[in-house]
Image (tube, rainbow, N blue to C red):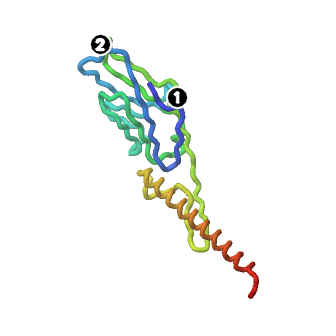
Amino acid sequence: MKQPAHLPGIQGSSIKIPFSFSFPWELTDEPQMRILWRWKHFHGEFIYNSSSGFIHEHFKDRFILNWTQPQTSGVLRILDLKEKDQTVYFCRIYLNTTEGMKIWQSIGGTHLTITHVVRTTIQTPSIITSAGLEDTESQRNPSLVNLGAMVRVVVTTVALITSAYALMIFLCWEQRPAP
């Protein structure tokens, strides 16, 4: 079982926890592979079951598992990250083999840390722009949040450079000798 040991997330955005697994056993004709997820600690509460469609109440409408049988890898996606989501997540696998039902789980899990981003505002003579990463209209699409943040950084940088050049030109103009 492979999962990243640590992942950072930003409150309000989404996170992808990739996982993969392999096994030495021969599968039956109907392996009935199931993926389950736990949180908080190794023997923690189940938060997802692929066979029943169970999703823990805390994750309702925020939990997507991108995996289909017989794949041996996938991605767990948690949308609209909340401060309470900061914990450890463990992937667990069930499958039927010619030796019977086999069950195994990640030992260390994935430690998810959530960062709260504070919205800041930078004012220049001609532009007022936000330099924070919050974007309430596109929280469910992190690529739009990243694109918006990138555009704000570029616009802010251009405004600051333009202001600096204008100040340099003004100072040079003031220091030139009178005719």
Q: Residues within 10 Å of mark 2 (few under 14, many from 20)?
A: few
Q: Which residue has dot 1 on it?
A: 41
Horizontal and vertical percent position of residue 27? 29, 17
Classify residue 124 by image quadrant.
bottom right
Horizontal and vertical percent position of residue 143? 43, 51
Quadrant where the C terminus sits is: bottom right
Mark 2 and mark 1: Cα distance apart in space? 31 Å
Q: Is residue 164 above or below residue 32?
A: below
Q: Secondary structure at mark 2?
A: loop
Q: Nearer the viewer, residue 52 or 2?
A: 2
Q: Is residue 148 left or right of residue 23?
A: right
Q: Indicate the amino acid at tag 1.
A: His
As drawn, the label of residue 98 is 2
Residue in the picture at 34% in, 16% down: 101
Quadrant where the N terminus sits is: top left
Q: Indicate the amino acid at tag 2.
A: Thr
Q: Residues within 10 Å of mark 1 (few under 14, many from 20)?
A: some
Q: Nearer the viewer, residue 56 or 76?
A: 76
Q: Nearer the viewer, residue 120 or 179?
A: 179
Classify residue 120 by image quadrant.
bottom right
Q: Is residue 115 left or right of residue 74?
A: right
Q: Secondary structure at mark 1?
A: loop
Is residue 45 at all visible to an observer of this figure? no
Q: Is residue 139 above or below residue 35?
A: below
Is residue 178 at all visible to an observer of this figure? yes
Horizontal and vertical percent position of residue 106? 47, 25
Q: Which mark is first along the chain, 1 or 2?
A: 1
Do residues under tags 2 and 1 come within 8 Å of each other at their CB atoms?
no
Residue in the picture at 40% in, 41% down: 63
